[in-house]
Image (tube, rainbow, N blue to C red):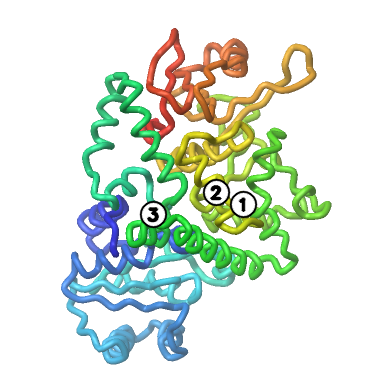
Amino acid sequence: MIFKRKIYEELRRWKQEDDGRTAILIKGARRVGKSTIAEAFAKNEYETYILIDFAESSDEVRALFNDVSNLNFIFMRLQMIYGVELKERKSVIIFDEVQQAPKARQAIKYLVKDHRYDYIETGSLISIRKNIEGILIPSEEVEVNMYPMDYEEFKWALGDSVSVPILARCFAGKRSLGDAANRSLMRDFRLYMLVGGMPQSVFAYIETNNMEKVDRVKRTIISLYEKDFNRIDPTGNASKLFHRIPAELNRNAGRYLTWSATNGARSGGLSETIAEMRESMVINMAHHANDPSAGMALHHAPERYKMYVGDTGLFVTLAFWDKTFTDNIIYEKLLGDKLSADLGYVYENMVAQMLKAAGHELYYYTFPTDSGKHNYEIDFLIADGDKVSPIEVKSSAYKAHASMDAFCRKFSSRIKNKYIVYTKDMRKEEEVLYLPVYMTMFL
């Protein structure tokens, strides 16, 4: 099944506006659907295409790009090998898993300059950065990030193209939906949290309506990520850091403590590993904003961060990795809105995923209370014009916001909007907008 994805329109704009003057690189975690959407776009928007999967291509195909002095020969061989006729300005060549063939990626500069055909690249995990040493990255390459299916794409897959536009209008007009409507919408949204946005998981749900089979698919994807992590870090620390994410969020310690996940390894010694995990897009990272302002990127703390799983469906499975599906009562609790307080970090991971998909970099902020015995914490900060908007995440109808009040007193001149993301209907009380979690996509 090929799902409708928003990135398709980005590819269409690239084709129309750049007209072959650039190649486009689709970056994303493994199994988010990069290859599928690239091939679907090629089928629909071009007369012919060739897809070169560098994870499985022959030595001959790889060797073609070692010397690009004779492009006519390269194109002739590709047409013969793949049995496809290339047509000038009407064909596209897909370099799938291009990180496996650095010379082919370097050749993009000359292929684009030739201008006969268009070029789409896909790249994931291991690790684009390690495979570019000694080559020249083409300036003719533009990048676009692909994330797991967002909530609207998930609804599209289920045959619903109406709900999200209605929600967008309600958000824009700050109109409440009513408690009954919100309860129904939350049931639907909790299904999205459980299934997640990985296309294979969504397909398994649509095909079987069986959450046990969905869980098996998610475990297969996580196992694939484990193998990839062990390739970039044979010590096993990358895999340990990944598996520890739910426990670290549950501790609510204000930062990810690497030593607790890696038998004593500190962040400094793991900086390269953590950078590669982040580049893989399997995880999302939120950095502590030392100076909450519109320029948070200039003042964040690189050594102080939280980690989130890029897909909350995978997060749910990862949180109960040591249990079989039949023992995994989180599915029942989530669908029945009986999630206990100690599992509220599932919502925090979901909000991180939605903010990232909406184009925000992730930041948070902590500071001591007047007594100094504990810290206030703002779960997320987003740049909002020349100011910032704090976001607190609640996994219930709980509406207290002592941390936000203290934060807004401390930085009163910098505050734009104040958001409490929770599970009940939208309402505004004084200057705080209480937002049902499924509306996070509109921030």
Q: Residue 231's spot in the image, x, y percent?
A: 64, 70
On the image, numbered disc 3 is attached to which residue?
Answer: 144
**Vertical comparison of 327 with 122: above or below:** above
**Element marked by disc 2:** helix
Pointers 3 and 2 in contact (CB under 8 A)?
A: no
Q: Quadrant of residue 56?
A: bottom left
Q: Tag 1's secondary structure? A: loop
Location of mark 1 (residue): 320
Q: Position of residue 336 (x, y in %)?
A: 46, 37
Q: Quadrant of residue 269?
A: bottom right
CA distance separating discs 3 and 2? 27 Å
Q: Nearer the viewer, residue 193 or 386?
A: 193
Pick the quarter of the image with the C terminus: top left
Please tell me how crowded label 1 is: few (under 14), some (14-19), or many (20+) other residues with Cα within 10 Å: some
**Residue furthest to the top:** 430
Q: Which mark is residue 196?
A: none
- Pointers 3 and 1 in contact (CB under 8 A)? no
* Residue at image location 74% in from the left, 12% down from the top: 370
Q: Check disc 2 and report the residue beneath it.
A: 316
Please, what is the three-letter code of the amino acid marked with disc 3?
Val
